[in-house]
Image (cartoon, rainbow, N blue to C red):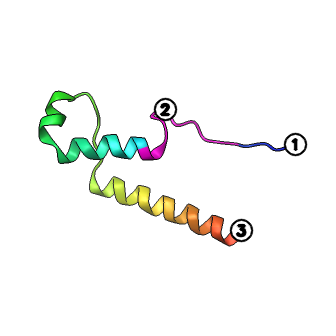
Amino acid sequence: YLYLAIEYAPHGNLLDFLRKSCVLETDPAFAIANSTASTLSSQQLLHFAADVARGMDYLSQKQ
């Protein structure tokens, strides 16, 4: 048997979430039209990048 455990992501996958969030921060007109959507700060983006890098490092050590 093969089991796959994944974490539930209410906003879909990370790539789509980041693309949607980054567009809002760089396009003020879009942000005004979609004021209910959230944006990500530079600090939050760096946190995501560091988490992904740590995950990739972990996986590379398992090979």
In the depicted structure, whether residue 32 falls above or below residue 62: above
Badge 1 is on which residue?
A: 1
User: Which residues make up the magenta segment?
Assistant: 5-15
Q: Residue at x 57, y 61 (%)?
A: 55
Count residues near mark 3 (Cα–Cα under 10 Å), then give few for <14, some for 14-19, many for 20+: few
- Asked which secondary structure carries label 2, the reply is loop
- Asked which secondary structure carries label 1, the reply is loop
Count residues near mark 2 (Cα–Cα under 10 Å), then give few for <14, some for 14-19, many for 20+: few
Which quarter of the figure has residue 45?
A: bottom left
**Percent of width and height locating residue 41:** 27, 51
- Mark 3–mark 1 Cα distance, whole angstroms, equals 20 Å
Q: Residue at x 57, y 64 (%)?
A: 56
N-terminal of the pair, mark 3 or mark 2, is: 2
Disc marking residue 16: none
In the depicted structure, whether residue 39 falls above or below residue 36: below
- Mark 1–mark 2 Cα distance, whole angstroms, equals 28 Å
The disc labelled 3 sits on which kind of residue? Lys
Which quarter of the figure has residue 38?
A: top left
